[in-house]
Image: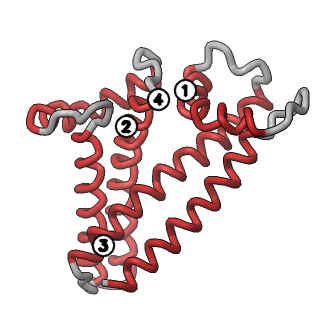
Amino acid sequence: MSSTGQELALFLVGTAFSIYITLLMLRFLLALVRADFYNPVSQTIVKLTNPVLVPLRRVIPPVGKTDTAAVLLMWVLQLLELWLKTLIVGQPIPVAALVVVSLFELAKLAIWVYIIALFVQAILSWVAPHGGHGNPVAAILYYLTEPLLRPIRRLLPDTGMMDFSPMAAMIGLYVLLILVNGLMRSVLGLL
């Protein structure tokens, strides 16, 4: 395959898998924080993920509050994406490395979902300063980020009009992302 063909194939595989894995991650996280599933954004995510998740749930039941079918599907799809990319570039990677990288990639995706959610929420607070009442995106972002921001708000001093908890959370998430990347490199070095 030509380098242009490889680049195109990598882009298409990466895009298709990333979109669906991100939808599954959003569904998993929204269920974890008990977001309003009647929200139009939630309903869209549910409708896009149900065709695969509903049959899978018949075989893989939830464990406690954890949607194990969604977690397993995300992991298998992430593993498949990485495997296809190694086939496209013609550089096979040991299965153990693929397993490790796929797990770390899912952890990084969860972190990125929160970073982006906090960023979009901050922008919405400037555009619609009263919390964007009635905006389904603002409501979903609140459900998603509030469990993360609440403990940070308790630690930070009350400054009045400015809420620095999203900034503190984003800094913490970036630090966590750096640590996850470092841990992934360390684990891969052991394989």
* Mark 4 vs mark 1, CA separation in Å: 7 Å
Q: What residue did someone put label 3 on?
A: 85
Provide the secondary structure element on which disc 3 rests.
helix
* Mark 2 vs mark 4, CA separation in Å: 9 Å
Provide the secondary structure element on which disc 1 rests.
helix
First of labels 2, 4 by sequence position: 2
Does 175 appear above or below 27?
A: below
First of labels 3, 1 by sequence position: 3
Q: What residue did someone put label 1 on?
A: 143
Q: Identify residue type, mark 1.
A: Tyr
Of tags 2 and 3, the one toward the viewer is 2
First of labels 2, 1 by sequence position: 2
Of tags 3 and 1, the one toward the viewer is 1
Q: Identify residue type, mark 2.
A: Phe
First of labels 4, 1 by sequence position: 4
Q: What residue did someone put label 2 on?
A: 28
Taking the spot 34% from the left edge, 77% from the top edge, the residue there is: 6
Q: Residues within 10 Å of mark 2 (few under 14, many from 20)?
A: many
5 sits to left or right of 36 = left
Q: Position of residue 173 (x, y in %)?
A: 61, 53
Q: Position of residue 64 (x, y in %)?
A: 27, 31
Q: Identify residue type, mark 3.
A: Lys
Q: Residues within 10 Å of mark 4 (few under 14, many from 20)?
A: some
First of labels 3, 4 by sequence position: 4
Q: Are marks 4 and 1 in contact (CB under 8 Å)?
A: yes
Does 135 appear above or below 95?
A: above
Q: Quadrant of the N terminus?
A: bottom left
* Mark 2 vs mark 3, CA separation in Å: 25 Å
